[in-house]
Amino acid sequence: MNLPETLLVTGARAPVALHLTRLLSAAGHRVLLADSLHLPLARFSRMKAGYLRIPPLRFQPEAAAGALSDLISREGVGLILPTCEEIFHLARLAQQGALPSPLFAPPFALLREAHDKGAFIRRCAALGLAVPRSLVLTSRAELERLRPEAGDLVFKPVWSRFAAKVLLRPSPQALDPIRPTPQAPWLAQAYLPGEEISLWAMAHHGRLRGLAAYRARARAGQGAAIACEPAESADITDFARRFIEGTGWHGQISFDLRRDAEGRLLPIECNPRATSGLHFFRDPKAFAAAFGAEGREVHPDVTGPQGVKAAMLAWGGKPLLRHPQQFLRDWSATGEMTAWPGDPPGPGGQILAMAEFTLTALRHRLSLQEASTRDIEWNGED
């Protein structure tokens, strides 16, 4: 099965959604976009076939499903490609039969398992993959037992993103505010000194179709990479292949890994969606050909650092002030992730998209990171 002519990319706020739209459009497909924002980044692309603003999937799932169904039926959409955390809401709607087009994603139960930081580690162990010591905490008593060894551990909510609320080797006193419950568990994980590696992959029903490994050169706070460089190796590919084959994964998936002091590659957590590794692909025909049962594996054709330069400025105040020459060297050596010949958005689109997040952050008293996912995030709700 090849890609249908008309496609719907959701999560249009993300740079990866913009890049996916360009790749598939340049390969000859008609790409529509949907999101609940007024000015998501990908909306500024000339390569889209149209944009639909839908009700927020997190807060109004039935209304959003109705708007999407109307668009899919009216435009003849043959496949939905999620890019952000809206994937959980869409997978639940697909499970309920509320979407009249296939979703490029695994079943909801598998998405939930991969997003659950504790369940993900258990699945990796069951597949015979090496894993770090990881303990799911559902009560204050379980947390108290780990207080003496807090300095050797990392603590984080099971349902979280962008490294939000992560406590890295905290003092015992820093654990005082944590209140784990069965509904809002935390994960305690062994601290692993070494190199952090991120991995984006694409799969078709358990078969690896594309992979890009990278390391961050700059981050939004402690979280998402806003500038990165390639970091390929055979054991990274082996990890991705074993997980994808072992779970029958279908769609995009991303991992955070760490190579410890002994050189072992260990999984930390999973993001069952698109991430920045997608930007290392620039050959539209090769990328589009990787979809489907007969597709061939596609490999990155970008070898240098890539970044979102507006985000590097937004979150780069301290590095710029502390090490201005190094910041400027990194800036000049980094290719712009959102650049594409003949297609905006350029700096103007980035600024408008960022302004909408800023207004949301101010209105709801959130950080910029929290504002960027407020209406699509999913935190284990039944």
Image (tube, grey):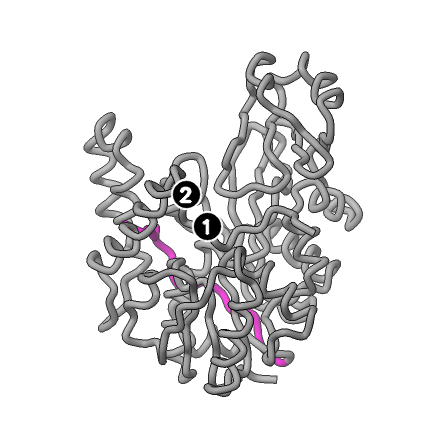
Q: Where is 177 relative to 115, above or below?
A: above
Q: Position of residue 219 (x, y in %)?
A: 39, 40
Q: Position of residue 182 (x, y in %)?
A: 73, 36
How many numbered discs? Answer: 2
Q: Residue at the spot x=57%, y=67% of the render?
A: 62
Residue of label 2: 369
Q: Residue at the spot x=58%, y=37% of the render?
A: 259
Q: Residue at the spot x=66%, y=57% of the render?
A: 111
Q: Are marks 1 and 2 in contact (CB under 8 Å)?
A: yes
Mark 1 to mark 2: distance in Å?
Answer: 7 Å
Q: Which is nearer the eye, 164 or 333?
A: 164
Q: Secondary structure at mark 2?
A: helix
At label 2, which amino acid type do we have? Gln
Q: Where is 137 relative to 95, above or below?
A: above
Residue of label 1: 373
Q: Is any atom of residue 208 visible in this view?
A: no
Residue extent of the magenta highlight:
294-309
Q: Position of residue 382 (x, y in %)?
A: 70, 52
How crowded is the residue under tag 1: few (<14 C-alpha within 10 Å), some, or many (20+)? Answer: some
Quarter of the figure with residue 102 = bottom right
> 136 left or right of 271?
right
Q: Which is nearer the eye, 235 or 60?
A: 60
Q: Position of residue 198 (x, y in %)?
A: 51, 47
User: Is residue 107 one of those drawn in magenta?
Assistant: no
Q: Residue at the spot x=58%, y=68% of the render?
A: 209
At label 1, which amino acid type do we have? Thr
Indicate the quadrant containing the N terminus: top left, top right, bottom left or bottom right.
bottom right
